[in-house]
Image (cartoon, rainbow, N blue to C red):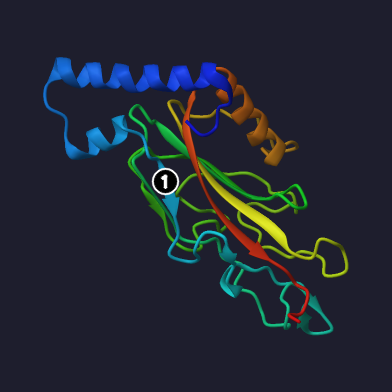
Amino acid sequence: MKIYDGTGALFSGRMFLAMGALVVGLLGTASAEDNARFHGGFKVSSATFESYSTLPISMIDNYAVNGVNACSSNGAPGGDQSPELSWTRAPWGTRSFVVMAFDETASFTHWGMYNIAPDVRSLPANAGISGSTYGAQIINDDGSVGYEGPCPPPNYLPAIHHYVFTVYALDMFLDLPASTDFPAAAETLLHALVTAVAQGHVLDSATINGFYSTAPAT
């Protein structure tokens, strides 16, 4: 289980897999998908970009300065669309998924979607629009609901930012505290995930990474 640290967490993960195998032994032969789940290997991929590659312009934000997009290295307009994401071998007992997009370089949350149905195995491109039906969304660190594309400032080092897209598999749904005056935000979701990890409700996580810079190529 990638999200946990230490030998205790590793032992717990092994116990989880052993218990799953025991259930199969008691109830009968497992399907191929069940066997994959019991043997781990939760993974996420994207048709929009390859892991550890440069993010495409379709994912980049738009911020016009003198009629030119300041969020791209050449001024090209960005699509500001969340990427297609697909995941496989979800852990046995998954009841919901959470997706987060985080700029590790700037400690900035670009997107958070939670309570994605347990039978969902992919999100199409632009699923992070406001009003999306794939799951509930938080207010990102830019102050808007849904996906906000990368826009690293070109005059601050490091110029290249590292973006991490993580899918979490939980054995529960999240009930985030929210109101009209205080809607669920990035910190709300992060706190809920930390609590879920501490209580053993996060079964596994999988990540895909990308990079982007607004600095002109040299």
Q: Is residue 38 left or right of residue 182?
A: left
- Residue 69 on image: x %, y %: 74, 78
Residue ranking furthest to the left: 28
Q: Which residue lies under the disc numbered 1? A: 43
Residue ranking furthest to the front: 7
**Local SS, label 1:** strand
Q: Is residue 19 left or right of residue 196?
A: left
- Residue 203 on image: x %, y %: 45, 28
Up-down relation of residue 28 to residue 108 (above or below): above
Residue at x-position 75% and y-position 47%: 107
Looking at the rendering, which quadrant does residue 35 occupy? Answer: top left
Residue at x-position 38% and y-position 31%: 94
Residue at x-position 34% and y-position 23%: 17
Quadrant holding the C terminus: bottom right
- Residue 101 on image: x %, y %: 61, 50
The amino acid type of the residue labelled 1 equals Lys
Q: Is residue 23 left or right of residue 81?
A: left
Residue at x-position 69% and y-position 63%: 150
Looking at the rendering, which quadrant does residue 18 occupy? Answer: top left
Up-down relation of residue 126 to residue 121 (above or below): below
Figure disc tally: 1
Label 1 crowding class (10 Å Cα cut-off): few <14, some 14-19, many 20+?
some
Residue ranking furthest to the right: 155
Q: Nearer the viewer, residue 46 or 84?
A: 46
- Residue 23 on image: x %, y %: 23, 17
Up-down relation of residue 200 to residue 70 (above or below): above
